[in-house]
């Protein structure tokens, strides 16, 4: 059995309030990937539809989406691991292809977060944690990441200013990304504006990514098909995945995400590469602290040294390890089920030298770090030109 | 007079937990009765000794459901905390409030910091106690207080 490659990538623009239904939103990412791969829906042997179900009104969205995209009668199924759903989709597609069960698999991630009203969304937010033991305290996603931020600051002397540098970097590249929801620059003054109260101390509004509607699509194929159909296939070199307890009381590490460390270790080992071999990376910056921890958990910096990396601009496009040079979740927006696919698309475009103004110089190997929940699910995917 | 059909008794004590409870039926409903008596309790597997907080009805390590309760006593170290200025539906009246985690060594407890403790008194690593409380809306909970 040979290699497994990515032969097509697409994504919709990430927007607030997409003016269409979920199937129409899914079509946008799909169309991009089909045109990129120069194939048709007849070439696809199976589809994996990924989203976070709490935002969907449609029960079992895989059916209506596969129908709309003309992917019947081939098998289709729904997959979710919160914000890392579409990375988990690509992992699953890899195994379907590697096993020989299918030749070409479509991984379609989507989320129409505006499908429900903001009141409904507020209500769901309260159930985002362990509903039996933690939600009754009134927990929210930013507050959990804020606890990690505070622990990181206490342990390593990381400051709110260090985190702000990550937001400023994201905005630098978000301006160049026509698919991003937030395309404006961000200044230190804006971030520390006393008129904007912190969301959950020590995290402020600009430390948090925005909700968005969007879709992404990744076409995974076996070596033979990839070489036959595609001029520049990008190969899946390493895959890592892990989980952690939902309840924070079950965890030991609060200055990093253990799922990222574990998934990273697996992916590096499978790919036979080291952190210093990574030429460009996409990490899950749902909050600024999440990117800071990712630097350290993936070995781009020693634990506690992440702040030195961003201060020296080593994660900028010209730096040692460029990270999120498409604006990241912070600027692109975070349509849960579509996010992992969007990250993978960015790295594929980088490895094909097609990232336009965001292009890093001659990258050979790229990495995607995609986290579901607050370090609940972790996926690391390593891609290469050869 | 026709006999009223007797309703099946449902043990839904868990609906009393926290500002808003999202669960009503659990095999560890006794946790709520312990809270009512002012005790915050976790569980210990009688067969293999594994300690659990939050409590569990079953031990996945040894597949025994023979558990005993233990009281969370003494002090735990403050692992981290965050003060919220936005809240999910149903928690608006509580704002602002701080969520936190205490480390007791063989188990950790997630919850809220008592309202009367000012922010500048909080520091990671400080010892705190876990105390059962009754909330203004009559619900039962626990809060972290000064050691
Ligand atoms: Zn046991």
Image (tube, grey):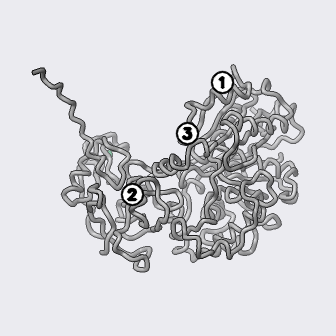
Numbered mark located on residue A75 in the image: 1
Going from N to C along the chain, the mark reached first, 3 or 2, is 3
Going from N to C along the chain, the mark reached first, 2 or 1, is 1
When the figure is inspected, residue A114 is found, relative to residue A363, above or below; the finding is above
Q: Residue furthest left?
A: B1
Q: Which residue is mark 2?
A: A137
Q: Which residue is mark 3?
A: A53
The answer to whether the residue labelled 1 contacts the one labelled 3, judged by CB atoms less than 8 Å apart, is no
The answer to whether the residue labelled 3 contacts the one labelled 2, judged by CB atoms less than 8 Å apart, is no
Viewer-closest of A298 and A84 = A84
Judge if badges 3 and 2 mark residues of a common chain: yes
Q: Position of residue B133 (x, y in %)?
A: 26, 62
Residue at 54%, 65% in the rendered image: A199
* Residue A205 location, quadrant: bottom right
* Residue A57 location, quadrant: top right
Judge if badges 1 and 3 mark residues of a common chain: yes
């Amino acid at each position: 059995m040979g290699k497994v490659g990515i032969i097509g990538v697409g994504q919709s623009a990430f927007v607030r309030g997409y003016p269409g239904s979920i199937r129409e939103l899914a079509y946008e990412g799909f169309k991009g990937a089909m045109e990129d791969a120069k194939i048709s829906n007849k070439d696809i042997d199976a589809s994996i539809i990924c989203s976070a179900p709490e935002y969907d009104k449609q029960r079992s969205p895989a059916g209506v989406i596969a129908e709309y995209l003309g992917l019947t009668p081939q098998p289709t199924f729904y997959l979710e691991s919160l914000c890392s759903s579409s990375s988990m989709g690509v992992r699953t597609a890899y195994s379907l292809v590697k096993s020989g069960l299918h030749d070409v698999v479509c991984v379609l991630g989507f989320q129409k977060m505006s499908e429900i009203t903001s009141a409904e969304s507020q209500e769901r937010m309260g159930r985002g944690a362990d509903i039996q033991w933690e939600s009754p305290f009134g927990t929210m996603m930013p507050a959990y990441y804020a606890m990690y931020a505070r622990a990181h600051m206490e342990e390593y002397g990381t400051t709110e200013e260090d985190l702000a540098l990550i937001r400023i970097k994201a905005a630098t590249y978000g301006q160049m990304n026509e698919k991003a929801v937030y395309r404006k620059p961000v200044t230190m003054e804006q971030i520390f504006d006393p008129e904007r109260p912190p969301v959950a101390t020590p995290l402020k509004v600009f430390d948090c990514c925005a909700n968005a509607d969007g879709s992404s699509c990744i076409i995974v194929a076996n070596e033979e098909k990839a070489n036959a159909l595609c001029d520049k296939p990008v190969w899946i070199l390493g895959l890592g995945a892990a989980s952690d307890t939902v309840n924070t009381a079950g965890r030991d590490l609060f200055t990093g995400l253990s799922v990222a460390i574990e998934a990273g270790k697996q992916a590096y080992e499978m790919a036979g590469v080291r952190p210093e071999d990574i030429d460009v990376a996409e990490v899950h910056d749902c909050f600024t602290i999440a990117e800071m921890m990712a630097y350290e958990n993936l070995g781009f910096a020693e634990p506690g040294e992440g702040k030195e990396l961003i201060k020296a601009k080593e994660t900028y496009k010209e730096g040692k390890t460029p990270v999120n040079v498409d604006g990241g979740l912070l600027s692109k927006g975070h349509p849960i089920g579509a996010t992992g696919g969007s990250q993978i698309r960015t790295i594929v475009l980088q490895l094909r030298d097609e990232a336009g103004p965001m292009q890093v110089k001659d990258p050979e190997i790229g990495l995607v770090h995609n986290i579901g929940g607050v370090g609940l699910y972790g996926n690391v995917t390593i891609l290469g030109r050869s | 007079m026709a006999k009223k059909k007797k309703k099946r008794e449902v043990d839904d004590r868990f609906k009393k937990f926290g500002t808003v409870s999202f669960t009503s039926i659990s095999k560890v409903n006794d946790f709520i009765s312990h809270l009512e008596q002012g005790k915050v309790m976790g569980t210990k597997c009688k067969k293999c000794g594994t300690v659990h907080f939050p409590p569990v009805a079953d031990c996945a390590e040894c597949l025994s459901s023979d558990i005993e309760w233990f009281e969370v006593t003494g002090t735990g170290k403050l692992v981290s905390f965050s003060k919220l200025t936005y809240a999910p539906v149903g928690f608006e009246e509580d704002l602002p409030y701080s969520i936190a985690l205490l480390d007791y060594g063989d188990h950790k407890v997630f919850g809220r910091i008592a309202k009367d403790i000012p922010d500048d008194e909080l520091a990671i690593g400080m010892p705190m106690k876990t105390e059962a409380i009754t909330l203004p809306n009559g619900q039962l909970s626990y809060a972290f207080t000064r050691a």
